[in-house]
Image (spheres, coloured by chain):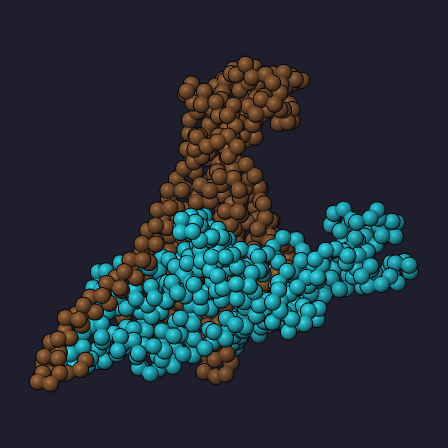
Chain colours: A brown, B cyan
């Protein structure tokens, strides 16, 4: 800003002031804009997620008049449980569907027609019959599962106007579906299997329960290992340790561990727990071990903060009344610091729940249909299930992936909300 | 054993109470009854536990040597690897699995022997644990007297426990370093470190047969490093301006209500699992970019570096913003007041006074964010490609160090091939780089903090 002759300082300032105010406004707008980009993404993110996921709550079913033919279910006629369990129930469903379209007779067309039914339809009939064997020999209307390709079309995720070669259903199949719709025999019902089943190759049968149980076992192991060790470490570092090389080393280590990429912990788990100790692959136990090493620093740092927040006067009062140092810590400081420690633990657990990269390393990316029964049985975890489904080509898995993500986020939200409530409830000012 | 320890606690406590009653005055006993009980329980449980753990470690070797020693001559003199196979067969038969070959009579005899020995060792160990536990109990029980300082002993034991727990962090670091380093060294025994660090082509498929086409198996990691840098660079281009500007806005301009809402909302971004970001990058952002690219006449791969980098940048925003926010609020108010007193506008104060004062802390925050970006796995696994292109074009698919670690190690694989060992070498590089970055960042931040405290 050069001053012209005959101009006072005041004039120079006045000349620049509007430009400076404009810059001020621009700067402020930039800041607000940056904040809006961040929050806008968050909103966009939740919008797409919810828009994609809510359809997974409902599953298309078809109403078929099933003839519970005794000759198919129980040819021997003795109602033996083994016979009832192994009968060809899928055939009942197929027969009922074929009976509705008697003009379809060619073998290939019949096969196309049968492909509209889910392979889970037979399983449903089986549990129906085993539950109430009196059904045998009667004819009842039953709402049965359809294949995921039909589900996708009925929900409108795949346009019916696409050329035939780009559709999963061909023209004949589509006509059948539309005929069924016109008869009011196609309806969307609550998708129970999503919450009770394990993984499946058929999207209409796939659920998140086995992954949830796997995650639960893993968090159990993580909690049992990391909470005591982390609290003990925090107590030692805050209350007992003198500042020397060793404790400095421990502190540097904790801070560094908190920032080591999670995948490196996975490498540790693979090399140490699986190859050296011979623990089984894909087991929640190993996952829990790895995750507890990862969450240790988080809980330690939170616990130390909770311990420092306890005022020294309480310590001095306890010591003054003749308590030993250990009694002072265990009877007075620790109970006061416990809410803070629990808050840190819950936050650490929430992070462990969302972690998936180290689990890929230790073989928890498995196709798990069964519900895991113990921390040693092979299982997968919720985030890994999301990863697996995101890789699946079927269109019907998209809504399930989103729904699984929503479930995962709800768990995280509940955990974090608990932590915040805990903090609010027990927070005290000294 | 737990039951025994509980019994010991109770017995020791009772003894202390009765000693106190006999003395007629509870004050004559040095420690509270609970401490005496704890003392007895410790003496009961710890030695027994030590014996148990020791035996658990020794048992497999002991079983192996004694079973092999009893094998017939022709089996015993087999070379190491084949002997291992035979032994594995025996163990599989014991567990009831199918073995690799039809078991012969001598193998069956060995199986019998293995079973007998195992049962023997189990009963021996239970007996030993019981005897040692009871012995410890009795010994400690006899020491319970009025003037016995049980509390001091128990407290010392607890303190040792605390020390042991706090070494866990060091053990983890050492464990990570050793496990990765040892496997990486085995890899460098097969591939020279120079080829690995400076080689320009990466195709880790080693052939099963020697005469197969493309059996060379090149392990030049430069394309991976450039891919990682490209994606992290894009991520930082998104995260640093957005994160920094929102931090400045929140710290300097926003009123308390906006701050109380916007800050936690931004931090939600940090709490979303990375696999969710990966899904988002692969299924939403990738196609959007591809369509936008083709509309503008650019060919954008659906697994482009741009998509992964953008989403990763959004993930990192809260790291940059919350750390910079702390740093900016830590700048003393006096500096701002002085600048305002000289007539500077708010933005001039921020740009010319606050920002330079906070710069070291901001640099530290950015370094931490870079180390995050380099080590991030799920986003790139799901949204970046697998092909190792040596390119700086953000519209093409590149691969990163973490993607390659995952692809090399997921699924079944033999543990000796250069292919799987390469993953550990990559892991070593990753670990060292992030370690250095974190260390420098922490030092910078700490020095900065001390400046104003």
Q: Say if residue A295 shows up in the picture.
A: no
Is residue B394 something that shows in the picture? yes
- Residue B129: quadrant of the picture: bottom right
Q: Is A160 placed above or below A278 here?
A: above
Residue B101 at what x, y percent from top left? 82, 48
**Along the line of sight, the residue nearer the viewer: A331 or B98:** B98
State the image coordinates of residue B12 (x, y, percent, origin top left). 54, 67
Q: Relative to residue A141, is residue A301 depicted above or below?
A: below
The C terminus of chain B sits in image quarter: bottom left
Question: What residue lies at 43% left-to-right and 45% top-to-bottom?
Answer: A402
Q: At 77% from the left edge and 58% from the top edge, which residue is drawn? A: B210
| Residue A63 image offset from top left, x and y in percent | 46, 22
Give x and y (percent) for residue B4: 59, 61
Image label count: 0
Q: Looking at the rendering, in which quadrant would you find the N terminus of chain B?
A: bottom right
Which image quadrant is residue B181 in?
Answer: bottom right
């Amino acid at each position: 800003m050069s001053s012209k002759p005959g101009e006072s300082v005041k004039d120079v300032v006045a000349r620049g002031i509007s430009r400076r105010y404009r810059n001020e406004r621009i700067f402020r707008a930039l800041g607000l804009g940056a904040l809006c980009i961040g929050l806008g993404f968050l909103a966009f993110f939740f919008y797409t997620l919810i828009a994609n996921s809510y359809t997974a709550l409902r599953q298309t079913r078809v109403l078929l008049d099933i003839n519970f033919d005794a000759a198919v279910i129980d040819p021997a006629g003795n109602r033996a449980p083994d016979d009832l369990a192994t009968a060809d129930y899928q055939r009942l469903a197929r027969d009922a569907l074929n009976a509705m379209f008697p003009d379809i007779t060619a073998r290939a067309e019949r096969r196309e027609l049968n492909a509209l039914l889910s392979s889970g339809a037979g399983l449903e009939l089986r549990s129906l019959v085993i539950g109430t064997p009196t059904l045998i020999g009667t004819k009842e209307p039953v709402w049965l599962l359809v294949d995921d390709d039909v589900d996708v079309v009925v929900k409108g995720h795949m346009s019916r106007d696409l050329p035939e070669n780009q559709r999963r259903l061909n023209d004949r199949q589509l006509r059948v579906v539309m005929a069924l719709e016109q008869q009011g025999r196609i309806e969307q019902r609550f998708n129970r299997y999503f919450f009770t089943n394990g993984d499946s190759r058929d999207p209409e049968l796939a659920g998140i329960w086995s992954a949830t149980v796997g995650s639960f076992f893993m968090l159990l192991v993580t909690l049992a290992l990391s909470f005591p060790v982390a609290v003990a470490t925090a107590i030692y570092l805050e209350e007992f340790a003198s500042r020397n090389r060793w404790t400095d080393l421990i502190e540097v280590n904790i801070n560094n561990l908190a920032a080591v990429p999670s995948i490196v912990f996975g490498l540790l788990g693979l090399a140490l727990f699986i190859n050296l100790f011979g623990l089984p692959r894909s087991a929640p136990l190993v996952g829990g071990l790895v995750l507890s090493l990862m969450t240790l620093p988080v809980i330690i740092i939170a616990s130390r903060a909770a311990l420092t927040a306890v005022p020294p006067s309480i310590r001095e009062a306890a010591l003054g009344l003749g308590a030993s140092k250990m009694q002072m810590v265990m009877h007075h400081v620790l109970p006061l610091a416990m809410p803070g420690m629990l808050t840190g633990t819950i936050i650490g657990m929430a992070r462990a729940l969302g972690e998936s990269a180290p689990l890929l390393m230790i073989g928890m990316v498995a196709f798990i249909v069964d519900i895991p029964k113990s921390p040693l049985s092979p299982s997968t975890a919720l985030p890994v299930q999301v990863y697996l489904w995101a890789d699946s080509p079927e269109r019907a898995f998209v809504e399930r992936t989103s729904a699984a993500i929503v479930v995962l986020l709800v768990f995280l939200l509940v955990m974090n909300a608990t932590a915040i409530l805990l903090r609010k409830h027990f927070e005290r000012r000294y | 054993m737990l039951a025994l320890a509980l019994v010991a606690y109770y017995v020791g406590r009772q003894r202390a109470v009765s000693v106190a009653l006999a003395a007629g005055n509870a004050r004559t006993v040095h420690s509270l009854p609970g401490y005496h009980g704890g003392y007895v329980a410790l003496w009961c449980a710890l030695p027994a536990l030590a014996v148990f753990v020791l035996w658990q470690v020794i048992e497999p070797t002991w079983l192996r040597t004694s079973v092999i020693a009893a094998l017939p001559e022709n089996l015993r003199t087999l070379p190491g690897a084949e002997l291992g196979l035979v032994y594995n067969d025996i163990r599989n038969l014991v567990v009831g699995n199918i073995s690799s070959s039809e078991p012969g009579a001598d193998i069956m005899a060995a199986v019998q022997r293995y079973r007998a020995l195992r049962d023997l060792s189990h009963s021996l160990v239970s007996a030993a644990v019981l005897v040692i536990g009871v012995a410890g109990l009795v010994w400690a029980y006899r020491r319970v007297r009025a003037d016995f300082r049980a509390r001091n002993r128990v407290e010392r034991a607890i303190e040792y426990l605390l020390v042991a727990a706090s070494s866990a962090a060091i053990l983890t670091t050492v464990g990570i370093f050793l496990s990765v380093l040892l496997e990486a060294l085995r890899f460098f025994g097969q591939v020279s470190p120079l080829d690995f660090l400076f080689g320009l082509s990466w195709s880790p498929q080693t052939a099963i047969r020697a005469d197969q086409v493309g059996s060379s198996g090149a392990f030049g990691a430069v394309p991976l490093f450039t891919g990682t840098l490209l994606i992290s660079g894009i991520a930082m281009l998104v995260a640093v301006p957005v994160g920094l500007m929102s931090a400045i806005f929140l710290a300097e301009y926003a009123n308390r209500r906006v701050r109380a809402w916007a800050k936690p909302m931004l931090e939600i971004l940090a709490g979303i699992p990375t696999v969710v970001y990966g899904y988002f990058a692969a299924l939403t952002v990738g196609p959007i970019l591809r369509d936008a690219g083709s509309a503008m006449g650019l060919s954008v791969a659906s697994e482009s570096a741009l998509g992964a980098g953008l989403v990763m940048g959004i993930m990192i925003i809260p790291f940059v913003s919350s750390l910079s926010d702390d740093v900016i609020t830590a700048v003393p108010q006096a500096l701002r007041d002085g600048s305002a007193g000289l007539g500077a506008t708010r933005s001039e104060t921020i740009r010319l006074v606050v920002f330079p004062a906070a710069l070291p802390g901001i640099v530290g925050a950015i370094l931490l964010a870079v180390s995050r970006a380099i080590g991030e796995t799920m986003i790139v696994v799901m949204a970046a490609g697998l092909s190792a292109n040596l390119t700086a074009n953000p519209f093409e698919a590149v691969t990163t160090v973490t993607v390659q670690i995952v692809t090399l190690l997921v699924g079944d694989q033999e543990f000796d091939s250069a292919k799987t060992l390469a993953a550990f070498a990559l892991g070593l590089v990753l670990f060292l780089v992030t370690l250095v970055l974190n260390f420098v960042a922490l030092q910078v931040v700490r020095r900065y903090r001390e400046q104003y405290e």
